[in-house]
Image (spheres, rainbow, N blue to C red):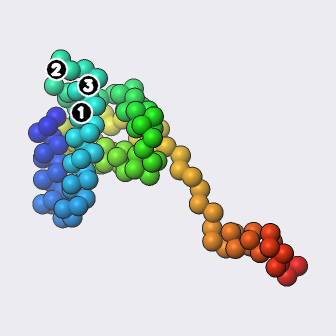
Amino acid sequence: MKTHITSYLTYLEQERNYSSHTITAYKKDLEQFYTFLEKQNPAPEPTVKTITQIILRSYLALLLEGGMEKKSIRRKLSTLRSFFKYLLKKKKYYCQPNSKSLNPKSRKKTSAIFRYAISRKINGTSSS
């Protein structure tokens, strides 16, 4: 799997022209996931074929329990989805885990207009 990660990062740099910052972030995300896989089953070296939906959900649970921001988790999962798509494209992996179930819900941001209207209502400056 390490060779797949290396070739993926090379692909991002040379063919997709990703910035060095993005490649560094992707590398960190993939190395963190690889370390997680090693801890799950230390005997054989982790391979792409051993990654299942259950393993991905366990990884997601670990990130959530660790108190990581959901925005950061979504980036890490986006990295994994992109990695799996690359492997599918290169015919190194034939079954992409269901990525839709791996997105933690994000908090909805209140629009500035709505916050302004509420503050006017609370402060009694509403024109109605």
Marks 1 and 3 in Cβ contact (< 8 Å):
yes
Q: Secondary structure at mark 1?
A: helix
Q: Is residue 73 visible?
A: yes
Residue tagged 1: 35
On residue 44, the disc is 2
Q: Secondary structure at mark 3?
A: helix
* Image point (16%, 20%), residue name: 44
The spot of residue 59 in percent (x, y) is 37, 33
On residue 39, the disc is 3
Left or right: where 101 falls relative to 31: right
The spot of residue 62 in percent (x, y) is 40, 33
Marks 1 and 3 sit apart, C-alpha to C-alpha, by 6 Å
**In this rendering, is residue 16 above or below 91?**
below
Q: From the image, state whether disc 2 or disc 1 is nearer to you.
A: 1
Marks 2 and 1 sit apart, C-alpha to C-alpha, by 13 Å
Q: Is residue 60 visible?
A: no
Amino acid at pointer 2: Pro
